[in-house]
Image (cartoon, rainbow, N blue to C red):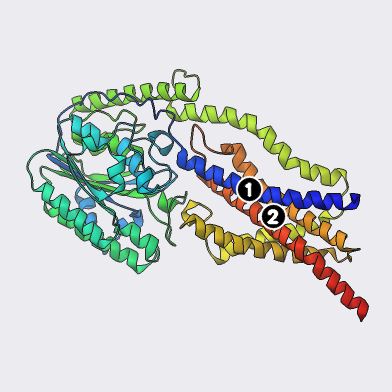
Amino acid sequence: MKKYLLVILGITFLAIAALGAYFSANGMINAIYDFRSPISNIPPIPGDPLSQPIPEKIVVVLVDALRLDTSQAVDTMPYLNHLREMGASATMHSQTPSYSAPGYSTLFIGAWPYLNDGPVFNLEYDDIHVWTQDNLFSAAHRNGITTGISAFNWFEKLVPQEDVDLSFYTPGEDRMADEAVVNAALKWLRQPGNQFILVHIDQVDYAGHHEGGASNQSWMEASKRADDLLAQIGAEMDLEQDALIVLSDHGQINAGGHGGHESEVLTEPYVMAGKGIRPGDYLDIQMVDVAPTIAALLGANFPASSVGSVQTAMLELSDEAIDSYLESEAATHLNLTRLYSSAIGQPWKEGDTIETSREEHLAKERLVRLPFALVILLIPPFLVIWRKMQSIRYLLPGSLSAVLLFHGFYGVISRKAYSFSAIDSPISLIVYCAITMITAVILGFVVSLLVKQKAFNDRLDTTKHVLSFSFTTIYLWLIPFLWSFWLNGYAPTWTLPRMDAFFWALLALIGVLFTAAAGLLITAIYPQLWMLFRHGRKTR
């Protein structure tokens, strides 16, 4: 019985590894969905409006998923490029996760996803929580400006509806939904008085997700239709008295999808034209700069939770107004940094910013996690050297082959992104990985047999080989997980993880899950096949 003990323990370990990887991956994802900002329950109190609105009407047209390069294609979006020539334009830079809900929150609150308390990943309509932080709609409403939103219905849940005077929400995302959205907004623009209106055009994002991606002709056609709708809005406005702002929440990769760290999903167009706008090409701004810059046009308070800056060079403001906003900006940032530092337990010192406070706290945690990650990483190689395990000569090539074969299928043949942009749906990723990883593990196991060459002694020997190969492959999958663990911890608590490493950690856990499953499958089948083959040779 003793000679079978290691086999029993090995099989048990594989089963535990599979279950552990499954529950760990779910725990990591659920922690992202459940994440709330450290200041969610202690939002900074907004200040008073700083002046009167400059334009009579300010219309923000959010073209969902519009890429910078698409926006610059004159043949596709002639009206947007006309606005770019006559107004102010810049390349806007965002941060991960590059999904719509965190993009909306960043744009209208002026804080990055780890701080603004908006949803981190896109949620179902019923699960979306209202913004807890000061935002442009609330700021405009306090300044006596009529606010309006004509958009996809997520905005109905995100924006405090007591601060929205005019609204039209749709569950649709396609061409027909956009036409209804724009028609509703056009009626409001014909009414007199100061207005702050959001018009959300969604069909470009729809084309990317459902009609072939950002390199497909459907994408360009949707962008052209979006430009036509933008022209309708512009025709209803007097840009001598009004201001029109066009921007996006994220881009899409060529294959379709977003959420990750690719440059094409983290750079967006930003165009302003009309009263109060100083024309010119202003190169680069950050997405968090949008809310404070629009607040200056609205004459509203500097957004209380914003880490951005008023782009004064883009605006025609008096010296007095500039001084007022810059003073408010400095005071807001100082108050916010103190509040945030206290919320995360990081001592505040003179000169700290939100980002330096966050990085210092992360550095402390990483210093604590590093020894644990190194110990787990180094124990297996130490055991191999200490026990002089000669079997590593054929186990490692087989395991490396399994991991590399998966990446060959994933990254080269399927051309999938190593980021959240690759996830159309969790189920589709799991099914793809299940098929691909199990296939790669079986092929890697064959490689280990070819490299081994030496015959097995008995069925127990074959079983031990299968288990040893599975353990070695699981170890290789754990390496990117340990990298992410050092950077991010197991799951987000007080801040968001580095999303590239976090994706690799999830992919690694999926690798552990299906390597363990494949190992159990091979353990059940291969020793029997070996016995049948051996028996067949003896009978001949």
Q: Are marks 2 and 1 in contact (CB under 8 Å)?
A: yes
* Image quadrant assignment for residue 365: top right
Q: Is residue 528 above or below residue 89?
A: below
Residue situated in front as seen by the camera: 138 or 521: 521
**Can residue 394 be seen here?**
no
Name the residue carrying label 2. 516
* Residue projecting furthest to the front: 1
**Given the image, on which type of amino acid does mark 2 rest?**
Ala
Name the residue carrying label 1. 21
128 lies left or right of 376: left
* Residue projecting furthest to the left: 192
* Image quadrant assignment for residue 305: top left
The secondary structure type at the circle numbered 1 is helix
Q: In percent of the image, x 24 and y 51: which residue is there? A: 84
- Residue 211: give x, y in percent of width and height: 37, 66
Q: Residues within 10 Å of mark 1 (few under 14, many from 20)?
A: many
Quadrant where the C terminus is found in the figure = bottom right
281 lies left or right of 418: left
The secondary structure type at the circle numbered 2 is helix
Residue situated in front as seen by the camera: 342 or 271: 342
Residue situated in front as seen by the camera: 388 or 359: 388
Q: Residues within 10 Å of mark 2 (few under 14, many from 20)?
A: many
- Residue 509: give x, y in percent of width and height: 62, 49
Q: In percent of the image, x 75 and y 41: which residue is there? A: 378
414 lies left or right of 310: right
